[in-house]
């Protein structure tokens, strides 16, 4: 009987350590329910905000354990920073806006960005919403433009750019 108890304690400890590692890696807290994930084998549905003319698929959509509100989580596993990048704040803002459009009053009013070295809780303020909509308008304008000028010197950004087809300044690599 003592051996069984020891095995159960070891199993419980292993589960707690596993949950802590998952929370640290994903930003999803123990007890929170993942409603959708775009990081697994199956793709989660694309959410849309027709009024804002944006759509997106957050890495995770999570339901709070206690208040049961829903919020998006964006994971940047290789990013090392103690401050939130503006581009990541705008990406999360877009995900918050589509979450709000889809879930209405069940939207928590915030989202999380998880870097390797930090986690940021971001509230969807009117100012952040305005900046996100302005950035979306800028992307739409760039897609219609005959030529789009590069604003950086990072080849990896060029490879993932939505307007690379219109850019005559692509970086190799």
Image (cartoon, rainbow, N blue to C red):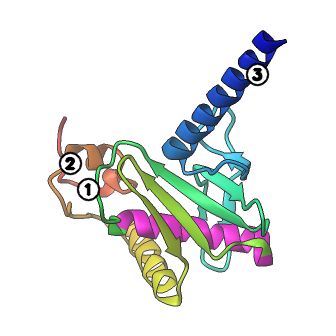
Label the magenta part by its dominant secondary structure.
helix
Q: Residue furthest bottom?
A: 126
Q: Which residues, given as a range, are shown in magenta?
A: 87-105
The answer to which of marks 3 and 1 sits earlier in the sequence is 3
Depth check: 137 or 145 in front? 137
Of helix, strand and loop, which one carries label 3? Answer: helix
Estimate how packed mark 2 is, as few (under 14), some (14 to 19) or many (20 or more) residues with alpha carbons within 10 Å: some
Verify whether residue 92 appears in magenta. yes
Query: Which residue: 20% across, 54% down?
Result: 168
The residue carrying mark 1 is 167
Estimate how packed mark 1 is, as few (under 14), some (14 to 19) or many (20 or more) residues with alpha carbons within 10 Å: some
The quarter of the rendered structure image containing the C terminus is top left
In the drawing, what numbered circle is on residue 170?
Answer: 2
In the drawing, what numbered circle is on residue 55?
Answer: none
Residue 136 position within the rendered picture, expressed as x and y whole percent measured from the top left = 46, 73
Label pair 2/3, CB-CB below 8 angstroms: no
Q: Residue furthest left?
A: 153
Residue 161 position within the rendered picture, expressed as x and y whole percent measured from the top left = 35, 52
The quarter of the rendered structure image containing the N terminus is top right
In the drawing, what numbered circle is on residue 8?
Answer: 3
Of helix, strand and loop, which one carries label 2? Answer: loop
Q: Residue furthest right?
A: 1
Residue 138 position within the rendered picture, expressed as x and y whole percent measured from the top left = 39, 75
Residue 8 position within the rendered picture, expressed as x and y whole percent measured from the top left = 76, 22
Query: Which residue: 63% across, 51% down?
Result: 29
Would residue 19 be found to the left or right of residue 106 on screen? left
The answer to whether residue 86 is above or below residue 62 is below
Depth check: 62 or 1 in front? 1
Q: Quadrant of residue 166?
A: bottom left
Label pair 1/2, CB-CB below 8 angstroms: yes
């Amino acid at each position: 009987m003592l051996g069984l108890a020891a095995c159960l304690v070891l199993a419980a400890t292993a589960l707690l350590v596993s949950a802590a590692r998952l929370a640290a890696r994903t930003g999803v807290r123990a007890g929170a329910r993942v409603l959708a994930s775009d990081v697994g084998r199956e793709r989660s549905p694309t959410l849309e905000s027709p009024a804002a003319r944006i759509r997106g698929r957050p890495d995770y959509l999570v339901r709070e354990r206690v208040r049961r509100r829903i919020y998006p989580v964006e994971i940047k596993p290789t990013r090392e920073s103690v401050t939130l990048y503006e581009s990541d704040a705008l990406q999360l803002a877009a995900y918050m806006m589509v979450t709000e459009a889809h879930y209405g009053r069940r939207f928590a009013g915030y989202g999380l960005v998880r870097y390797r070295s930090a986690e940021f809780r971001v509230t969807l303020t009117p100012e952040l919403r305005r900046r996100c909509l302005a950035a979306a308008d800028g992307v739409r304008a760039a897609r219609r433009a005959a030529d789009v000028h590069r604003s950086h010197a990072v080849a990896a950004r060029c490879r993932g750019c939505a307007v690379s087809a219109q850019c005559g300044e692509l970086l190799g690599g």
